[in-house]
Amino acid sequence: MSFSATLSVADDIATIVLTGELDASTAPRFHDLIDDAAGSGAGRLEIRAEQLGYLSSAGLRSLVFARQKMGDEVRIALVGAAEPVSRTIRLAGFDHSIELIDA
């Protein structure tokens, strides 16, 4: 499955939409968008994951990168993640650092 990621910013919310598989080969594209989102000064980062089919350990590290890059004062939410993706996040204990929201 091919990977795509897009960023939009509106009303203090940066939204990144992910499609496909977030792994070592696709993480750099996601990192670029996180850098852009952090530069926007948004107070919230919403990661739309309805079409994200797979999250590897490199993808999980990308979420850690997002938490670090955005800063503690920015709320990060992963929205609509499929059960395998959200389970990976919960097993890593990272659901305490980002919010998991059902779509």
Image: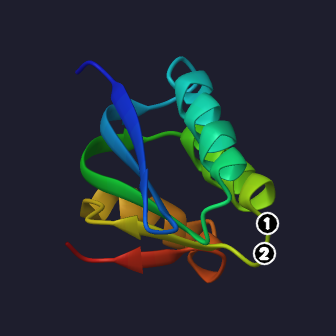
Percent of width and height locating residue 7: 42, 41
Percent of width and height locating residue 61: 68, 46
C-alpha distance separating marks 2 and 1: 4 Å
Q: Secondary structure at mark 2?
A: loop
- Tag 2–tag 1 contact (CB < 8 Å): yes
Residue named by callout 1: 71
Percent of width and height locating residue 65: 73, 48
Q: Nearer the viewer, residue 66 or 57?
A: 66
Indicate the quadrant containing the N terminus: top left, top right, bottom left or bottom right: top left
Tell me if residue 45 comes above or below residue 6 in the rendering: below
The residue drawn where x is 44% and y is 68% is 11
Residue type, numbered disc 1: Gly
Indicate which disc residue 72 carries: 2
Residue type, numbered disc 2: Asp
The residue drawn where x is 52% and y is 68% is 12
* Image position of 35 (left or right of 81): right
* Image position of 83 (left or right of 87): left
